[in-house]
Image (cartoon, rainbow, N blue to C red):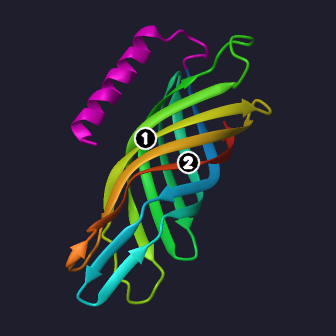
């Protein structure tokens, strides 16, 4: 994934959304907080270092996070932070995202009440719990998220989300052979509960 290509796709996507969007909500400012949980499916790592072999099996990391966003009409900007972990690995991610919102008129779709699509930059740490394994360097990457939401009231909703993430953590040490980085392209999925105000 090349960032200039990704940025070009984002600009084109948001531009086309602005051209074809029909007003489904008043043009006013609002905000939301979305709590989410799920699993992040990461890749493997296998390398030989001067201290011996280093190996990570493919992981499904349990994820818990929070997203805060500010919205104007169909466009929003948000910040996110999450913690991921298993018995062998833990990770911390934060990001800034720009997205668009569809709120179909009643009867237009069967479900959902709201669809959010966002793209953004993420960064974080990836750590192995095993003593003496070594560290991975802080990394920056790209994330695209789709969230479908069902309204329980004017201010409360529940939803399903899915992320595509591209972030590679370089091993901070000498690698004689094998992998020099881990994760790369990955997917995360889960459930969310949100508040609008």
Residue 66 appears left or right of 113: left
The residue located at (26%, 68%) in the rendering is 180
State which quadrant residue 85 falls in: bottom right
Residue 107 x, y percent position in the rendering: 74, 11
The picture quadrant where one finds residue 11 is: top left
Asked if the residues shown at circle 2 and circle 1 are in contact, with their CB atoms under 8 angstroms apart, the answer is yes
Query: In x, y percent, where is residue 7?
Result: 28, 34
Q: Is residue 26 magenta?
A: yes
Mark 1: give few (<14), some (14-19) or many (20+) Cα within 10 Å: many
Q: Residue at x 47, y 47 (%)?
A: 79
Q: Which mark is residue 79?
A: none
Q: For this rendering, which residue is in front, 159 or 35?
A: 159
Q: In the rendered image, which quarter contains the C terminus? A: top right
Find the magenta span and give its range. 1-27
Q: Magenta segment: does it hold 69?
A: no
Q: Residues within 10 Å of mark 2 (few under 14, many from 20)?
A: some
Q: Quadrant of residue 127?
A: bottom left
Mark 1 lies on residue: 97
Placement of 190 over or under 75, stated as above or below = below
Q: For the N terminus, which image quadrant? A: top left
Q: Nearer the viewer, residue 36 or 182?
A: 182
Mark 2 lies on residue: 67
Task: Please tell me whether the stretch drawn in magenta is mainly helix, strand or loop.
Answer: helix
| Residue sitting at x 49%, y 12% | 21
Q: Tag 1 or tag 2, which sits nearer the N-term?
A: 2
Secondary structure type for disc 1: strand
Picture residue at 65% right of the left edge, 16% below the top: 104
């Amino acid at each position: 994934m090349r960032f200039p290509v990704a940025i070009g796709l984002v600009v084109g996507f948001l531009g086309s959304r602005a051209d074809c969007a029909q007003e489904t909500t008043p043009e006013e400012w609002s905000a939301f907080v979305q709590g989410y949980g799920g699993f992040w499916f990461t890749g493997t790592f296998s390398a030989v270092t001067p201290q011996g072999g280093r190996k990570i099996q493919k992981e499904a990391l349990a994820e818990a996070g929070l997203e805060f966003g500010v919205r104007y009409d169909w466009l929003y900007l948000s910040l996110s932070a999450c913690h991921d972990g298993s018995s062998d690995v833990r990770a911390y991610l934060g990001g800034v995202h720009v997205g668009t919102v569809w709120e179909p008129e009643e009867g237009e779709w069967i479900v959902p009440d709201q669809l959010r699509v966002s793209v953004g930059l993420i960064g974080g740490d990836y750590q192995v719990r095993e003593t003496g394994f070594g560290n991975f360097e802080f990394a920056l990457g790209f994330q695209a998220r789709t969230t479908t939401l069902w309204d329980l009231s004017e201010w409360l909703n529940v939803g399903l989300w899915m992320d595509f993430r591209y972030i590679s953590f370089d091993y901070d040490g000498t690698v004689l052979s094998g992998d020099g980085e881990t994760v790369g392209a990955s997917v995360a999925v889960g459930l969310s509960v949100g508040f609008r105000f």
